[in-house]
Amino acid sequence: MLDLSLLLPKKIDNSFLGNKVALWFFYLLTAVTLWRSQHHLFSPDGGAQSIATIPLDTYAQGASLTIIGIFALWGLSQLVISVIYLVSAH
């Protein structure tokens, strides 16, 4: 069986004893995740055509709207992850 004590700290007290470079990388990762989530949520194409270069105009309207909806849900999941990042960083 997997021993979770090898993966998880014995005490969670919001103290970071690691390298400061890792902490700054975590802040950068949080900022990038927030930017990506807002782009997927607020872009008219959800980032499907403007970022992923999916030719939405070649699909039927229902298919295009489905693809945009999937990208918006992807942005929502990234927003949830970034909120968890923000909570863990403070």
Image (tube, rainbow, N blue to C red):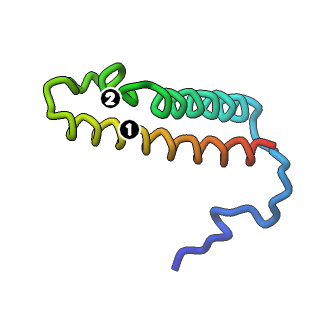
Mark 1, Cα crowd under 10 Å, few <14 / some 14-19 / many 20+, is many
Residue 31 against residue 72 in the figure, above or below: above
Q: As shown in the figure, which amino acid type bears the numbered disc 2?
A: Ala
| Percent of width and height locating residue 52 | 31, 26
Q: As shown in the figure, which amino acid type bears the numbered disc 1?
A: Phe
Identify the residue at image location x=33%, y=36%: 68
Residue 21 against residue 1 in the figure, above or below: above
**In the rendered view, does 29 fall on the left or right side of 8?**
left
| Percent of width and height locating residue 30 | 63, 34
Observer-nearest of 37 and 26: 37
Return the residue found at the far top: 50
| Percent of width and height locating residue 64 | 24, 34
Observer-nearest of 81 and 6: 81
Identify the residue at image location x=59%, y=47%: 80
| Percent of width and height locating residue 3 | 60, 74
Q: Secondary structure at mark 2?
A: loop
On the image, numbered disc 1 is attached to which residue? Answer: 71
On the image, numbered disc 2 is attached to which residue? Answer: 48
Is tag 1's residue or tag 2's residue first in the polypeptide sequence?
2
Asked if disc 1 and disc 2 are in contact, CB closer than 8 Å, the reply is: yes
